[in-house]
Image: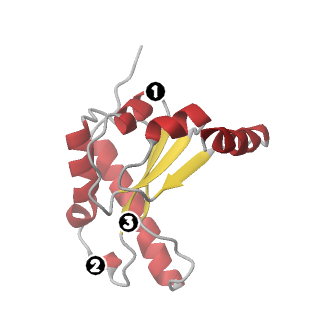
């Protein structure tokens, strides 16, 4: 499995795109993805992720994280930023994230292809707001 994944990720990198892996598993094999060449890993925070040091370790090493946490709901625009950001804040706190670099993105839990354009815009706006909240809560450490 790893060899096949490495072949695909290498081909993606050779085409000058970022090799990323999206995993819906409750136990994403982060180390396998990293050793296969993933430069970004997307995980679903919509389920109980067991605390594993693989994800924070990958993040510390500069691997991009896409944290799928924003639900797809018609009325998402009426949700408070506190409601929207709580899951990510809890995950980051429990995982030991002390600061956030640019290699963290907040994403929807599911695809937007089947939702109304207004809902898609509201969901993407919520992703942006939660990303800003997380960066404010966990300011980046600057290295001189």
Query: Which residue is label 1 attached to?
Result: 61
> Does 18 sit left or right of 121 as displayed?
right
Tell me the quadrant of the picture where the N terminus can be found. top right
Of all residues shown, which one is farthest toward the front?
Answer: 1
Residue 112, above or below 1 = below
> Does 80 sit left or right of 144 as displayed?
left
In terms of depth relative to the viewer, which is nearer, 75 or 47?
47
Query: Which residue is label 2 attached to?
Result: 78
Determine whether the residue tagged by mark 1 lies in a helix, strand or loop: loop
Image coordinates for residue 41, horizontal then vertical, percent: 50, 46
In terms of depth relative to the viewer, which is nearer, 2 or 55?
2
Alpha carbons under labels 2 and 1: distance apart: 36 Å
Would you identify the image quadrant in which residue 45 lies?
A: bottom left
Determine whether the residue tagged by mark 2 lies in a helix, strand or loop: helix
Would you identify the image quadrant in which residue 98 lies?
A: top left
Q: Earlier in the sequence, mark 3 or mark 2?
A: 2
Residue at (46%, 35%) from the top-left corner? 31
Q: Residues within 10 Å of mark 1 (few under 14, many from 20)?
A: few
Query: Which residue is label 3 attached to?
Result: 126
Q: Earlier in the sequence, mark 3 or mark 1?
A: 1
Any mark on residue 50, and which?
none
Image coordinates for residue 75, horizontal then vertical, percent: 33, 83
Residue 102 in view in this figure: no
Q: Residues within 10 Å of mark 3 (few under 14, many from 20)?
A: many
Q: Earlier in the sequence, mark 2 or mark 1?
A: 1
Image coordinates for residue 73, horizontal then vertical, percent: 36, 80
Determine whether the residue tagged by mark 3 lies in a helix, strand or loop: helix
């Amino acid at each position: 499995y790893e060899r096949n994944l490495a072949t695909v990720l290498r081909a993606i990198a050779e085409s000058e795109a970022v090799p990323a892996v999206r995993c819906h598993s409750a136990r994403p094999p982060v180390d396998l993805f990293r050793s296969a060449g993933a430069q970004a890993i997307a995980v679903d925070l919509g389920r109980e992720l067991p605390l594993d040091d693989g994800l924070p370790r990958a993040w510390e090493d500069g691997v991009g994280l896409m944290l799928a946490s924003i639900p797809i709901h018609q009325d998402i625009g009426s949700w408070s930023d506190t409601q929207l950001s709580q899951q990510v804040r809890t995950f980051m706190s429990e995982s030991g994230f002390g600061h956030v670099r640019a290699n963290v993105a907040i994403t929807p839990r599911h695809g937007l292809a089947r939702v109304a354009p207004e809902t898609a815009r509201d969901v993407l706006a919520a992703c942006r707001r939660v990303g800003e909240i997380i960066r404010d809560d966990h300011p980046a450490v600057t290295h001189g």
